[in-house]
Every structure is written in structure tokens, then in C-alpha cells.
Image (cartoon, helix red, strand yellow):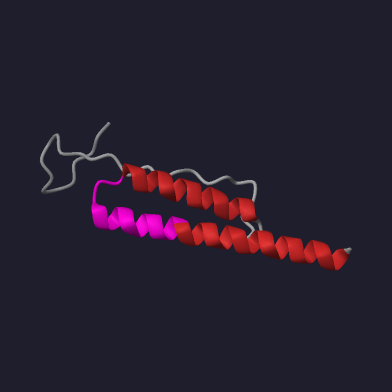
């Protein structure tokens, strides 16, 4: 059943935007896989985006997530080395 908001014309219903699902396995900022997944999903969203300004912003955000993943990997290696 579709509901029409007041002032909205019949047939002008737009489905909500579907965002890529995040894995529920890990949400630790120290986990590189968390950041790699966010980067992957953000890049996918960028490929689906028509607006060039939005596409550029999403690509920049994905690059930042990749950098965070690299830092998390570096931190994991450093923790591992300290424990040896």
C-alpha cells in the first residue's frame, strides 16, 4: 500500500535510497577490514552516483577510509611486534 503525502501527486512516489549494508561482524575502528569494507561500499556508491560533485566527494571519502585501513593495519603490526 502506498501513501501519498499531502501536496504530492499520485504516481510521484520515490523509493528510499538504498545504502550498501555494512558487515555486522566487526565495527572496531582498530580493525582494518572494517575500513576496507567502508571504502569498498563508498566506492560502489560513487560509481552509482550521477552528480559529479557528489561522486568526487564519495571518492575522497573512500580514499580516506582506505588510509584509515592502512593505519589500522600498521597499528596491528606494531601491537604484534610489541607482543613478540
Q: Could one spot residue 2 in this view of the protein? A: yes
Q: Residue at left 42%, top 59%?
A: 61
Query: Quick check: 14 left or right of 6?
Result: right
**Does the magenta portion include 61?**
yes
Task: Provide residue 77's location: percent of width, then percent of height.
Answer: 75, 61
Q: Is residue 30 magenta?
A: no
In the foreground, 8 or 83: 83
Residue 69 relative to residue 18: left or right:
right
Q: Residue furthest right?
A: 84
Q: Is 45 in front, or is 70?
A: 70
Query: Please, which residue is most extreme toward the bottom here?
Result: 82
Q: Is residue 71 left or right of residue 39?
A: right
Which residue is the extreme one toward the top? Answer: 1
In the rendered image, residue 16, in percent from the top left (x then y), is placed at 31, 43
- Say which residue appears at 89% left-offset and 63% top-offset: 84
The reply to whether residue 19 is in sight is no
Q: How many marks?
A: 0
- Residue at the spot 26% in from the left edge and 58% down from the top edge: 53
Residue range in magenta is 49-62
The residue depicted at 62 percent of the width and 64 percent of the height is: 71
By secondary structure, the bulk of the magenta-drawn segment is best described as helix
Say above or below: 15 vs 72: above
Name the quadrant containing residue 70.
bottom right
Q: Position of residue 65 (x, y in %)?
A: 51, 58
Q: Where is residue 72 shown, x and y percent of the image?
A: 64, 61
Quadrant (top left, top right, bottom left, bottom right) of the N terminus:
top left
**Quick check: 48 left or right of 65?**
left
Amino acid at each position: 500500500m502506498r501513501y501519498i503525502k499531502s501536496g504530492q501527486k499520485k504516481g510521484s512516489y520515490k523509493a528510499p535510497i538504498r545504502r550498501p549494508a555494512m558487515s555486522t561482524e566487526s565495527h572496531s575502528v582498530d580493525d582494518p577490514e572494517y575500513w576496507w569494507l567502508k571504502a569498498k561500499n563508498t566506492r560502489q556508491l560513487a560509481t552509482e552516483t550521477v552528480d559529479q560533485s557528489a561522486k568526487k566527494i564519495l571518492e575522497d571519502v573512500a580514499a580516506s577510509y582506505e588510509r584509515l585501513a592502512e593505519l589500522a593495519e600498521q597499528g596491528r603490526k606494531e601491537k604484534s611486534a610489541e607482543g613478540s
